[in-house]
């Protein structure tokens, strides 16, 4: 029994240790290149976006059209119950979402923009708008996101016909934080659902 207990404690410690290894996310977009987005944990990599390769069109054999069978009728869930569950879920997600946002660290942001419109006057106007939009967005995001100092470079090109974009974002999050947020949301949703059903039952009894 003692050996089994030590084995379970060792397994639990290993799971906790693995959950404390951060998951990294990378987003990248460059002009004339397909965007990239993936998660990396330890030696594992999970692509979040994979550009579709063009496939050669194959001749489709003609088939006789058959009338599609009508789907079986299902009794719809009461709208009030569905709406109540949706409200409970949204209300329960607040705390867990705030926890994820606070703990998700954006440690690298690189944005290099070349603004070019083919016309000097139009390029100057667009350059001013892009500066205002980019730095305004960063000032707003900095209020509620955990992010480091970005590498932002915006410059006009009064000769070129088209501009270019070089954007990269890297962040990390501890898996144990995601598990804690999911547990928090689930427990809060369960409590709110039980309270709502009790209140509905009491209202039905009074009526």
Image (cartoon, rainbow, N blue to C red):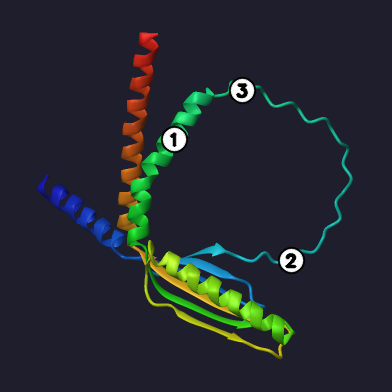
Residue 44 shows up from this direction: no
Judging by the rendered image, the residue that carries numbered circle 2 is: 54
Q: 23 or 142, which lies in front?
A: 142
Mark 2 closeness class: few <14, some 14–19, many ≥20 residues within 10 Å: few
Disc on res. 190: none
Q: Mark 1 and mark 2: span between their CA atoms?
A: 43 Å
Judging by the rendered image, the residue that carries numbered circle 3 is: 74
Q: 92 or 73, which lies in front?
A: 92
Direction from residue 71 to residue 127 in the image, left or right: left
- SS of the residue at dot 2? loop
Direction from residue 128 to residue 179 in the image, left or right: left
Q: Position of residue 12 (x, y in %)?
A: 22, 53
Q: 136 or 147, which lies in front?
A: 136
Q: Nearer the viewer, mark 3 or mark 2?
A: 3
- SS of the residue at dot 3? loop
Q: Quadrant of the N terminus?
A: top left
Residue 123 shows up from this direction: yes
């Amino acid at each position: 029994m003692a050996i089994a207990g030590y084995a379970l404690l060792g397994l639990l410690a290993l799971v906790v240790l693995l959950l404390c290894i951060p998951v990294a996310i990378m987003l990248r977009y460059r002009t004339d290149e397909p965007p990239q987005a993936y998660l990396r944990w330890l030696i594992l990599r999970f692509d979040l976006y994979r550009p579709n390769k063009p496939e050669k069109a194959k001749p489709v054999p003609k088939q006789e059209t058959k009338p599609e069978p009508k789907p079986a009728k299902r009794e719809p869930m009461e709208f009030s119950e569905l709406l109540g569950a949706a409200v409970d879920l949204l209300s329960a997600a607040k705390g867990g979402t705030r926890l994820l946002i606070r703990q998700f660290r954006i440690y690298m942001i690189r944005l290099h923009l070349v603004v070019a419109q083919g016309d000097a006057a139009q390029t100057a106007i667009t350059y001013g708008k892009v500066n205002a939009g980019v730095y305004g967005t960063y000032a707003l995001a900095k209020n509620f996101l955990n992010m480091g100092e970005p590498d932002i470079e915006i410059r006009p090109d009064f000769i070129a016909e088209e501009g270019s974009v070089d954007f990269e974002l890297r962040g990390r999050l501890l898996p144990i934080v995601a598990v804690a947020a999911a547990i928090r949301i689930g427990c809060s949703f369960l409590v709110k659902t039980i309270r709502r059903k009790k209140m509905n039952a009491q209202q039905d009894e009074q009526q």
